[in-house]
Amino acid sequence: MIKHSFFVAGVLTITFLAGPASAQPAAPVGTLKQRPPVVDAPVKTMPMVNIEHMMTLVQDAVLMVDAHKDLVADATLLAGHATLFNDLHLDFDSTFDHQLTSEDRQKEREAEARERERERESRLYEDAIRARDESRWERAVERFNDVATMKGARADAALYWKAYAQDRLGQRADALATIAALSRDYPKSRYLKEARALDAEVRRNAGQPVRPQDQADEDLKLMAIAALQHQSPEQAIPMLEKLLAGPSSPKLKERALFVLAQSDSPRARDVLRDIAKGNSTPELQSRAISYLGTHGGRESRALLAEVYAATTDVDVKKRILRAFMTGGEKDRLFAAAQSEQNPELRAVAVQQLGVMGAHAELSQLYQKESSADIKKSIIQAMFVGGNATRMMELARSEPNPDLRRQAIRNLGLMGSKGTGDALVEIYGTDKDLAVRRAAIQALFLQNNDTALVTLARKEGDMTLKKEIVQRLSNMHSKVATDYMLELLNK
């Protein structure tokens, strides 16, 4: 898995160096676009690059590989949304016949309001981070202040980065006041260690003007890190530790962490493990977990298992489970799916097994599982893994009607060879009305107009026949149109 990541990273690096003629922009998350046509271009001579620039490209390429894998993992969530949509569509009559009480409606409104507030906070924080990374300090101060004012989950982080941006603007009195507010209002914040280091630097620089050459100094430090990585890695580790503990820029800290991840030194692994355990900011912890999952082989991922066992933070455990998927740790995911007491984490482990295509493990889990909710997650993971054979078995024989309907709907989304015939068979042999309606919807999702017309011609139940015709009326195909004409001519 590691060799594969670095091979892809190397290819991406060469692509970047070759210039814009060979590079294609990535599609945004959540969108599905066809790949643009390849345009032949003259072969360009590869430009000369310095060591630091090469390391930057390699690191960014590795991160792109990891991000791609995260996007694959997110397919599970999108598939879950698709199933939820179908659930709502198919079961509308049976689920919403009862009237919600005024208390239920009030709880729903409050939950929706909280979710909107979390989304707004997330958008503002992401905008602030972009401004920080682009050195637009005034914009960063403004946006981080907006987030801090909301007093949500990211308020302490926003205060720290607000003070950081104020220091970069030379507003050192304001930066000290912001750090004091962070220490006063969030005494357990994980940003306090960095805030104390920033406080010391701000006081040391008090009375001095903003230095335009700071950015150039940082570039020199990045080059020095790249050189030490190759020439004297042992000597570099103490310096990298000091850099990570201080108020350096996020870019510099992330690069230092990347260098540590490449090292075989026991001390480097200890530093990486401490950060992965949470002895730093959440951003660096997340990056450390990602690096441990990608670099260093099974020994590094054994450190992740150690962190997983020691932490009680559910979000950290989720990131570790995703890192196990990135690192090809199928056995560790399988163990978590079997033994994890938290249903949410069990579901994430199952989800990652689906991304890995662990058909045998998922089938074994399903046979032993007693929780219907976890079984739903397993069915969804089988769908993501493309296990059409097992999905057809469940669609035919699963005794739980809800689980069976989910398997049927997934068959409609999979579209593999033979799934259409299986759906027609299920429709013809099953007497459960809800199951038959699920089969109709699945065939519609497959765009299987031929099968639906065949069912409509044979169906004697006028309610089901109307439902089939309604689906055909939305398909706009020749087969569907011909059948509509056939109905009109009767």
Image (cartoon, rainbow, N blue to C red):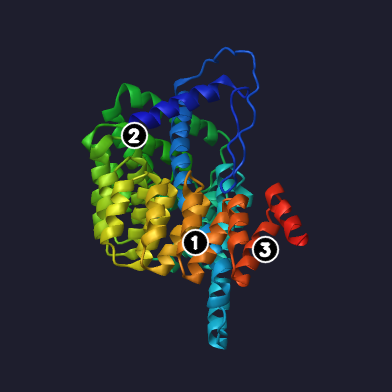
* Mark positioned earlier in the residue sequence (3 or 2): 2
Residue that appears at 65% across and 60% down: 471
The location of residue 180, given as percent across then percent down, is 46, 62
Which residue ends up furthest to the front in the rendered image? 490
Residue type, label 1 = Gly
Residue that appears at 69% across and 57% down: 474
Q: Taking the image as drawn, is residue 323 in sight?
A: yes
Q: Which mark is residue 428?
A: 1
Give the answer, above or below, for where 430 lies relative to 60: below
Q: Disc 2 on helix, strand or loop?
A: loop
The location of residue 288, given as percent across then percent down, is 36, 44
The location of residue 420, given as percent across then percent down, is 51, 50
Q: Which mark is residue 250?
A: none
Which residue is tagged 3?
470
Residue that appears at 49% across and 55% down: 423
Mark 1 or 3, which is nearer the eye?
A: 1
Graded by Cα atoms within 10 Å as few (under 14), some (14 to 19) or many (20 or more), the crowding at tag 3 reads few
Mark 1 or 2, which is nearer the eye?
A: 1
Residue type, label 3 = Gln
